[in-house]
Amino acid sequence: NKNIVILISGGGSNMAAIVQASRARQWPARFGAKVAAVFSNKATAQGLVWAAGEGIPTGVVDHRQFAQREAFDAALMAQIDVHSPALVVLAGFMRILTPGFVQHYQNRLINIHPSLLPAFTGLNTHQRAIDMGCRFAGATVHRVTSELDHGAILDQAVVPVLPGDTAEALAGRVLTQEHIIYPRAVERLLAAMP
Ligand code: GAR
């Protein structure tokens, strides 16, 4: 039984895309895989409401309750490990994880980042791409290493940057592609698991 645990901080549209793909593409029957739980570091994350409405167990580990990153990560790991996950999927999870967390989920931890990595690691990717005069932007699914937004690339999607683009317009164009490549990358990993 391959459990998928998804971590979010906000809207959770990528999380929802993965949950919907898991059903439409019959991951339980084909891979013995399901989205077992969704966790957020923010109680107000809208994605939690959607996940709960779908009958998926949800939880909150509020980073503000912890003085040290290590303590937050340990609490999060304890919640995640209840589900013995085959995959831990970061989907708009806006906290930097400690090397101890990354090592614990080595080969099981993936992220989506809203740029064509290795360009534009970090925040504010769309405005930075516009400001640089990029003609193309996109999104990257990658394995997580202890270096932020590094790690082997699993999939990418490219979108044009259009004349007069705003960060919001570009973000929306990229997000539409994220909803395609993230479920696809997860399915490929599931298919490759023994
Ligand atoms: C997505 O665009 C994702 O790539 C980005 O946040 C958005 C979350 O949207 N992630 C990062 O910036 C990670 N540093 P969602 O909550 O609707 O999936």
Image (spheres, helix red, strand yellow):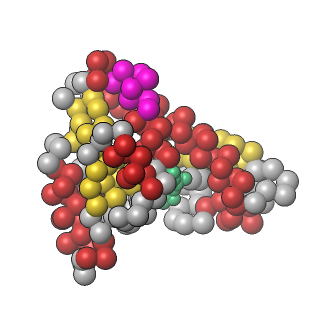
* Lateral position of residue 111 relative to residue 132, left or right: left
- Residue 26 magenta: yes
- Taking the spot 32% from the left edge, 29% from the top edge, the residue there is 190
The quarter of the rendered structure image containing the N terminus is: top left
Is 73 above or below relative to 16? below
Whether the magenta-drawn stretch holds residue 50 is answered as no
**Total numbered labels:** 0
94 or 105, which is in the foreground? 94
Image side of residue 127 versus residue 153, left or right: right
Q: Is residue 41 visible?
A: yes
Quick one: which residue is furthest to the top in this view? 29
Q: Based on the displayed image, in which of its 4 quarters is residue 95 positioned?
A: bottom left
Quadrant hosting residue 186: top left
Quarter of the picture containing the C terminus is: top left
Residue found at the far right of this picture: 163
| Front one among 66 and 191 | 66
Most extreme residue toward the bottom is 67
| Residue 142 seen in the current view | no
Residue at image point 29% right, 23% down: 28
Q: Main secondary structure of the magenta part?
A: helix
- x, y percentage for residue 82? 14, 48
Pick the front one: 69 or 66? 66
Measured from the top left, where is residue 118 in percent x and y?
55, 54
Question: Going by the image, does 129 lie left or right of 32?
Answer: right
Q: Residue at x 69, y 43 (%)?
A: 159
Give coordinates of residue 167: x percent, y percent. Answer: 70, 60
The segment highlighted magenta reads: 20-27
Residue at position x 45%, y 41% from top?
A: 16
